[in-house]
Image (cartoon, helix red, strand yellow):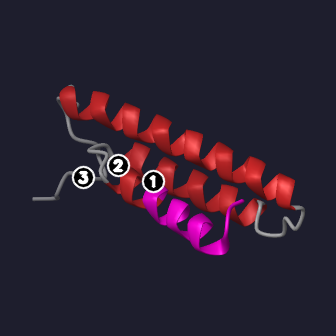
Amino acid sequence: MASKCQVRSLCRSLLRAGRQFPDYNIREYTKRRTLDGFRMNKSLTDQSKVNEAYAEGKAQLEVVERVLKVYSAYPPKTKNIMELKLQ
């Protein structure tokens, strides 16, 4: 059974993991996807549906962490246009 505290912790963990990506586009995609998913499920009241959504969120956190390891091992060679500073 997932409590509100656990759900908030999962949301924060997903947002923290997303901020670690070196690529701007992936960071923003992870943030947007996380916030949209939690907003979509905030009105769930049935405990079984809440547990399903929580389990899906935990699975997504594992995916993000796995992809983050790959990205840290093979960083992009060029910077994104959003990360370049105008000179």
**Is 78 placed above or below 27 here?**
above
Magenta part of the chain: 1-14
Which mark, by number, is residue 1?
Answer: none
| Residue on which the image places disc 2 | 24
Give the percent coordinates (x, y) of residue 51. Answer: 75, 53
The front one of 78 and 64 is: 64
Q: Which residue is mark 1?
A: 28
Q: Quadrant of residue 1?
A: bottom right
**40 in magenta:** no
Left or right? Give the position of 22 relative to 32: left
Q: Earlier in the sequence, mark 2 or mark 3?
A: 2
- Give the dominant element type of the magenta stretch: helix, strand or loop: helix
In reply to whether residue 3 is colored magenta, the answer given is yes
Residue matched to label 3: 83
* Up-down relation of residue 31 to residue 55 (above or below): below
Q: In what element is the residue under mark 2?
A: helix
